[in-house]
Image (cartoon, helix red, strand yellow):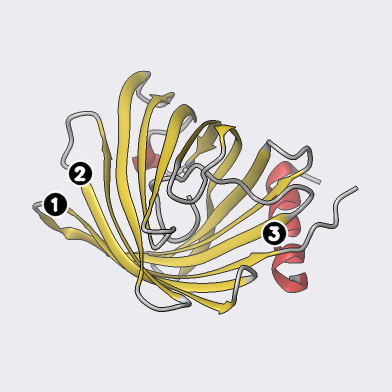
Amino acid sequence: MPFKKLLMAAVAVLATTAHAARPMNTDDARIVDAKSCQLESWVKHPRGHTEFWAQPACNFTGNLELTMGGSLTRQDGSTRGSAQMLQGKTLFKPLETNGWGWGLAMGMARDPRRDAGGGHDMYAYVPASFSLLNDKVVLHTNVGWLREQGTRSNHLTWGLGSETQLQERTWLIAETYGQGSGKPLVQVGLRYWLVPDRVQIDATYGNRIGEGSQRWFSVGLRLLSLPFLP
């Protein structure tokens, strides 16, 4: 079975059985619990098309989260495979309440659309997180590197985000992120735990600063398992 079909089959199975946690793009210094898995899925609607994403991740060893995912894009009445990604993430200092943590993530992503440049992009970044007010406010920072294979160019990547608890199960998220010298993107949204630490839903609005035509909306679902891996 071709890799693309195998990937989509795995995503479909996970969905029916069960770069940060949804809906943030700025990553955090956390990983999935040891011997556990999660599935992050969402629909993103930029202007002119709709993206359907799924990213399952598992922690087999205790300190290495492996994520493999992809998307389908619907545009002009047709649906096609768009992007795939594979990432590994580890922590050098786990985040603690009223403390801080940091780690390293490395991965590879591919977007075959002609306007995306083509090729497999390589990237790495350092996520750092800071807990305040007994975890009621958590700040995240990312600094990294991106190698675009389509254009054979290197870029600095960065992100700055926050999670603020509004109620017991409701969180406000806000972030800005970007790469190189281009205008940064911003995103705000809400995250709500239907089942604490197991089932989460979210919704966001985002845009590029100074470019109203690049706005998007997204809604997502995140599922986290109990430990079950051998």
Q: Is residue 155 above or below residue 45?
A: above
| Residue at position x 43%, y 49% in the image | 98
In this picture, residue 217 sits left or right of residue 198: left
Q: What amino acid is found at the position of numbered circle 3 in the picture?
A: Val
Residue count near mark 2 (Cα–Cα under 10 Å), binned few <14, some 14–19, many ≥20: some
Q: Position of residue 146 (x, y in %)?
A: 39, 27
Amino acid identity at mark 2: Pro
Pointer 1 residue? 209
Which of the labelled discs sits on residue 20, or is there none?
none
Whichever of labels 1 and 2 marks the residue nearer the N terminus, that label is 2
Q: Do the residues labelled 2 and 3 touch (CB within 8 Å)?
A: no
Residue 77, picture quadrant: bottom left
Dividing the picture into quarters, in which one does residue 204 lie?
A: bottom left
Given the image, on which type of amino acid does mark 1 rest? Ile
Q: Residues within 10 Å of mark 3 (few under 14, many from 20)?
A: many
Mark 3 lies on residue = 11
Residue for point 31% across, 35% down: 158
In terms of secondary structure, where does tag 3 sit?
Answer: helix
The image shows residue 68 at horizontal and vertical percentages of: 64, 45
Callout 1 secondary element: loop
